[in-house]
Image (tube, helix red, strand yellow):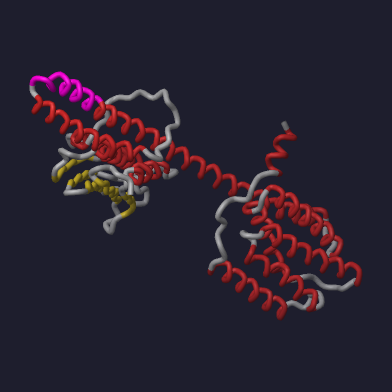
């Protein structure tokens, strides 16, 4: 068991898409340079200036590459510091190094945050070697030595903790997307089954009257053609939708007409008001089900998370080629009506995008919260 755990840590890959160097990185290095210059001018108990310059460059330079090349940054920084301290031991050079080298803690953090398992283990060995040598160059008490090791081990543990917390969040977001895809696939299945059943009935009717009433058979063929076209549109929408399980029940799904049932009588808080504008007769059943689910989820979030909300206004507008859903609540935007981890919004975003639509949720100018979704009437992905 322990061997397997160590092996899994050793083969752990790097996190994907580490951030590139940005203004904050350059600002950090600039601040540390100013700190080092001020300390070099004000302090009198320092080591020779060439050693100080080498030590500062060893720490500050690699900070710019700590995310993209964590092991190289640690090796350059702590390797150079090891050489500096070894020279101090061999030559007996008096004086201390600049306190700005404590920025090396950032490199220890970055090693475990952005490095692979092999890189983290190798880099930790370099750090521990430097710690052993630097305490020979600058003898300290046992308590100070233990505190020094604790600082660096805390930095590495913090990097590892944030790394795995991010990894778990990404996994949870993927699971939320998978659940939404499964629900959407179930709803699309019902839609296609409905169309195919209609095609089968019309085909049977056309065959029964083909001999005696050819004109009625032609009408049946026309209906079959229209139903087949709608079915193909729904099947295209299914492309790319992943099913997580096959044992779910297939029940009729609600649509735009059922959105009105989400309204309340005003006795409970928040009060839910629903308004429908436009035509929804030829709306794709998959889109209708999505509109209902998005409205339902938004109302649920408002009830759970919108502080001091008194009303939720749901507006559905259908035009020639699109349907727009807007949900406004007057609660405080600090809670925002969103789920604490944000996975409800992730699922809503996934549902809208799979049908070729757009989704946005955020605070309004009046410090309330608004959810907006726009879907094509046919539910065709873009």
What residue do we see at 17% from left, 30% from top?
221
- Residue 56: image quadrant is bottom right
Residue 104, position as x, y percentages in the image: 70, 62
Above or below, 66 relative to 231: below
- Measured as percent of width and height from the top left, residue 302 is found at 31, 42
Q: Quadrant of residue 363?
A: bottom left
- Residue furthest out toward the bottom: 41
Q: Quadrant of the N terminus?
A: top right
Seen in the picture, residue 84 relative to 44 is either above or below; the reply is above
Which residue is at 16% across, 43% downward? 275
Residue 324 magenta: no
Name the magenta segment's main secondary structure: helix
Q: Is residue 246 left or right of residue 211?
A: right
Along the horizontal axis of the image, is 171 left or right of 2? left
Up/down of 236 relative to 69, above or below: above
Q: Residue 329: in sight, yes or no? A: no
Residue 207 within the magenta-colored segment of the rendering: yes
Asked if residue 104 is positioned above or below residue 32 in the image, the reply reads above
Give the residues in magenta: 197-212
Instruction: Answer left or right for 269 relative to 148.
Output: left
* Count of picture labels: 0
Left or right? Give the position of 345 relative to 258: right
Q: Position of residue 319 (x, y in %)?
A: 17, 48
- Give the residue displayed 20% in from the left and 31% down from the top: 224
- Judge whether residue 127 can be spotted in this image: yes
């Amino acid at each position: 068991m322990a061997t397997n755990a160590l092996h899994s840590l050793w083969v752990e890959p790097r996190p994907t898409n580490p951030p590139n160097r940005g203004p904050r990185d350059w600002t950090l290095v600039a601040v540390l340079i100013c700190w080092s210059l001020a300390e070099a001018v004000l302090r009198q108990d320092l080591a020779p200036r060439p050693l100080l310059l080498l030590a500062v460059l060893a720490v500050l330079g690699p900070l710019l590459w700590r995310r993209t090349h964590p092991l190289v940054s640690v090796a350059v920084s702590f390797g150079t510091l090891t050489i500096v301290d070894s020279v101090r031991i061999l030559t007996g050079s008096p004086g201390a190094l600049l306190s700005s080298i404590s920025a090396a803690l950032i490199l220890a953090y970055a090693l475990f945050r952005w490095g692979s398992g092999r890189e983290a283990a190798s880099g930790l060995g370099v750090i521990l070697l430097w710690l052993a040598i630097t305490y020979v160059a600058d003898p300290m008490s046992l308590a100070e030595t233990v505190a020094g090791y604790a600082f660096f081990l805390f930095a590495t543990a913090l990097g590892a903790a944030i790394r795995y917390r991010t990894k778990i969040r990404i996994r949870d977001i993927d699971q939320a997307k998978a659940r939404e895809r499964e629900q959407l696939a179930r709803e699309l299945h019902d839609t296609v089954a409905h169309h195919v059943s209609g095609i089968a009935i019309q085909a049977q009717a056309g065959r029964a009257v083909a001999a005696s009433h050819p004109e009625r058979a032609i009408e049946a063929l026309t209906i079959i053609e229209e139903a087949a076209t709608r079915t193909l549109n729904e099947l295209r929408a299914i492309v790319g939708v992943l099913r997580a399980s096959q044992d779910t029940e297939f029940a009729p799904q609600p649509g735009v007409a059922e959105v009105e049932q989400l309204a309340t009588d005003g006795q409970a808080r928040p009060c839910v008001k629903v308004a429908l504008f436009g035509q929804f007769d030829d709306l794709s059943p998959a889109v209708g089900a999505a509109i209902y689910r998005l409205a339902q989820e938004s109302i649920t979030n408002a009830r759970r998370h919108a502080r001091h909300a008194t009303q939720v206004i749901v507006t559905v507008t259908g035009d020639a080629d699109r349907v727009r859903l807007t949900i406004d609540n007057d609660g405080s935007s600090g809670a925002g009506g969103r789920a604490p981890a944000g996975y409800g919004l992730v699922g809503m975003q996934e549902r809208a995008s799979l049908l070729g639509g757009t989704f946005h949720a955020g605070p309004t100018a009046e410090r309330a919260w608004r959810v907006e979704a726009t879907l094509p009437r046919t539910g065709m992905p873009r």
